[in-house]
Image (cartoon, rainbow, N blue to C red):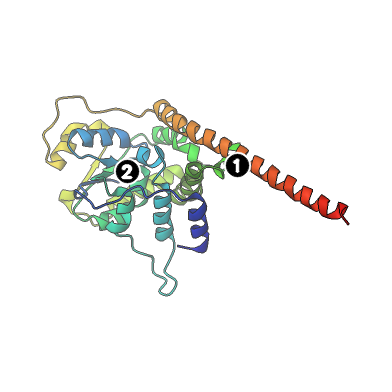
Amino acid sequence: MTFTDSILHSVYGLPPPTIGTRKGQMQVLAVGISRSGTDSLREALHILGVNHTHHGFDTILPPSSLEAIYKLLQKKYTTATKTGATKKLTAEDFDTVLLNSVGVSDLFAAEFAPELIEAYPNAKVILNVRRDLDGWQSSVQNTMGYFDKNPLDWDWCKSWFNAELFWIRQTMSRTMMPRFFRGSFESNGKWVYEQHVAMVRGLDIPEDQFLEWSVEDGWEPLCKFLGKATPTIEFPNGNPPKAWAERIAKTMEIHHKRAVKNMLLFTAFACVVAAVAVGAFSARHVGR
């Protein structure tokens, strides 16, 4: 941990998102990018008994794991001082976030796809794809696009007065999104998507452990791949952009209210300190 990271933890530190020991082996790594049926797949895996599958909502609702994810990102994108070699991420590292999960999906899984596959070699790998690339881009822009920018606005000011808001900005807007999308989703989203799909296809994954799949494929190939009986219910189809926005907005509202309260308390405290300082200064000079 760098000196800067130590300072950030001292000021904005969150409790560890997971504690204890892993109770079940990692079973499924769904490494497709966000808005590629990740929530529908998460729900399908739950129905098939793969529960709990870590999803983007576990990252933001609540954002308790964001500091731990930031540390993983720092380890991935920094190099060892002496050897110059990239620091290897292990299952122990990932279990700081995934300890209570037997599956993982969404942007976290996509961001760390090669590392997760190496860390959990016995897990099945699903490359969940979206065939309509324009539709995918629009869907991300209307949801995850919220984290694609880090403007110096009122929300930016509030992020310094609430730990959860700070880590949402620090991990998502300042680190994960720009790193994964090479600076900007708006500019690079489509080619990064295509490159990611090609990268995963090119990994050395045993044939019986790899499935490329889309929501349109439904239950049959998924159940065959996982060795599960095919459910008689319809395949889940959840998390449209509007529902995503409503869930995020509800959580963000809570953090924004806390941030404003902290800002007011800080301002009041600063005013009291300033008044005392001015009074002491005036008294010293009047008494001369």
- Expressed as whole percent of the image width and height from the top left, the position of residue 235 reads 22, 28
State whether residue 73 is above or below residue 222.
Answer: below
Nearer-the-camera pick, 180 or 258: 258
Point out residue 85 in the picture as x, y percentages from the top left corner: 39, 69
Q: Quadrant of residue 272?
A: top right
**Residue 240 as seen in the image, left or right of residue 214:** right
x, y (%) of residue 284?
82, 55
Which residue is pictured at 46% across the width and 45% down the height?
172
Residue 32's label in the rendered image is 2
Residue 155 as seen in the image, left or right of residue 84: right
Amino acid, disc 1: Cys
The local secondary structure at tag 2 comes to loop
Q: Residue furthest bottom?
A: 82
Q: Mark 2: give few (<14), some (14-19) or many (20+) Cα within 10 Å.
A: many
SS for dot 1: helix
Which residue matches tag 1? 157
